[in-house]
Amino acid sequence: MDFTVLETARDSFAQLLKLGDARLNQALLAALAERNRDTNTTLFAANLLRRSGDLPGARAEFAKLGTGGGDASTGGGRDWPCIPANNWSNGGFAIAPLVIIDDFLPVERMQALHRHACEREGEFRAALATNEGAEPSYDPDRRQSLLDYKFTLEREFFGTFISQNLQVLQHGLGLPEFSVDRCELKLTNHVDGGFFRIHADNHAAFADAGRAITWLYYFADEGASFSGGELLVLDSCPDKSTVSPAWFSKVIPLANRFVAFPSAFYHAVTPLSHVGGFARGRFAVSGHIRKRADNSVAWWEIENLSD
């Protein structure tokens, strides 16, 4: 199954794709290199790098700002790179913190998971869009992707990984510690024409019960080749339901990459183009960690309360 991107959906990505173009951002970085560095120019460089998809480069610039080293320590001698919390871009928008782990699984296990997903092709269904106060429905102008909720291979591993590393993820994302209600888990595949327009996975206050952390694990076989399908995590004011018109972090969907971010931040999946059918799509294990209600306040909420 392939999808056709409706014109209205394609138009909604036009400006984001232009802003994320590596050549544009490299040209701006080259011009910036001729200026004296201060806090503002360092933050500008970090923003240009993350917008173009160079997350290691952005992380290095954030480290220069002294706002947190940008690593989540596992305590086992291996730190996970992060885009650190408690940073803000122009317009007062919070920069979404990210935890990123490359080479997440042994390659053989990743490839076995891909074979498992391909064997379950008949179990995948078109994703439904959810709207507040309405039943989920198929909306090809908002989302085109395929889902499988009942895969089995590595399912237990992912559940165990999340439970064993919850505090590390909370720390890396700058979140208060919370009690888990339950974890959602599914396989997703974006085939030719697949996309997901800007949305947030949770619109409630952080203290409320609901999705707290969204995470993805990208996997593929050696022959996977596609363009697009990037995850754009936009600078946001989650408690005001607003997003930056210009700034975001682009996450390249590299095979064997794990990424996590707070569910309150707006994000999107850019339209994907490829040939080769279902097996050559952009596969991911997609998860949400749901928290119980408590009295906690997220760092982006604290900042806005002080305004």
Image: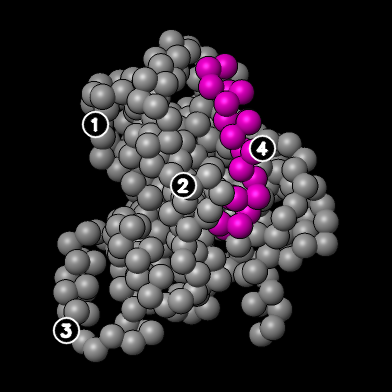
Mark 2 neighbour density, 10 Å: few (under 14) some (14–19) many (20 or more): few
Q: Is residue 219 left or right of residue 287?
A: left
CA distance separating discs 3 and 2 = 36 Å
Task: State the SS at label 4.
Answer: helix
Residue 163 - label: 4
Between the residue at mark 3 and the residue at mark 4, the CA separation in whole angstroms equals 47 Å
How much space separates mark 1 and mark 3, taking CA atoms? Answer: 37 Å
Say above or below: 124 vs 63.
above
Q: Nearer the viewer, mark 4 or mark 1?
A: 4
Furthest toward the right, the residue is: 294
Q: Nearest the camera: 177 or 183?
A: 177
Q: Residue at x 83, y 56 (%)?
A: 294
**Crowdedness of circle 3 by 10 Å Cα count: few (<14), some, many (20+)?**
few
Q: Residue at x 22, y 59 (%)?
A: 22
Q: Is residue 61 visible?
A: yes
Residue that extends furthest to the front in the rendered view of this protein: 77
- The part of the chain drawn in magenta is 152-173
Assess whether mark 1 and mark 4 are in contact (beta carbons under 8 angstroms).
no
Residue 78, numbered label: 2
Q: Nearer the viewer, mark 4 or mark 2?
A: 2
The amino acid sitting under disc 1 is Ser
Secondary structure beneath dot 3 equals: loop
Q: Is residue 95 visible?
A: no
List x then y, in percent, for residue 307. 66, 85
